[in-house]
Amino acid sequence: MENETNHDERPPFFQIMLNDMMLLLFLGVTIFVVFYIAWGFIELGNVPNMPDETKAEVMSPIY
């Protein structure tokens, strides 16, 4: 009698989380989107500045 399992117990949290397919899909997509956006900002921060001569050519009016 002592070895009987109690069926009224709640399953562990991770089992509930891993059984929810929509939650796994949402987390999978969200994690990739967040990392790609962060990677993009890091890449933009590594772009060198435009030289002053090129900047002057681009900003001058074409008349």
Image (cartoon, rainbow, N blue to C red):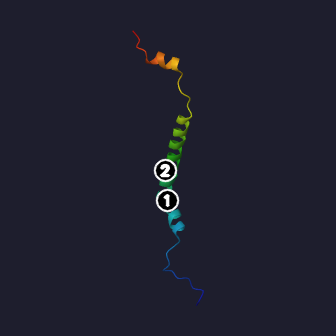
Classify the position of the C terminus by image quarter.
Answer: top left
Name the residue at 47% across, 54% down. 26
- Circle 2 residue: 30
Quick one: which residue is furthest to the right in this view?
A: 3
For this rendering, which residue is in front, 37 or 58? 58
Quick one: which residue is furthest to the bottom in this view?
A: 1
Q: Are marks 2 and 1 in contact (CB under 8 Å)?
A: no
Residue 46 in the image: x percent, y percent?
Answer: 57, 34
Q: Report, in whole angstroms, how far the alpha carbon at label 2 lies from the one at label 1.
A: 14 Å
Q: Secondary structure at mark 2?
A: helix
Q: Hey, what amino acid is under mark 2?
A: Thr
Classify the position of the N terminus by image quarter.
Answer: bottom right
- Circle 1 residue: 21
Q: Count residues near mark 2 (Cα–Cα under 10 Å), then give few for <14, some for 14-19, many for 20+.
A: few
Front tag of 2 and 1: 2
Q: Hey, what amino acid is under mark 1?
A: Met
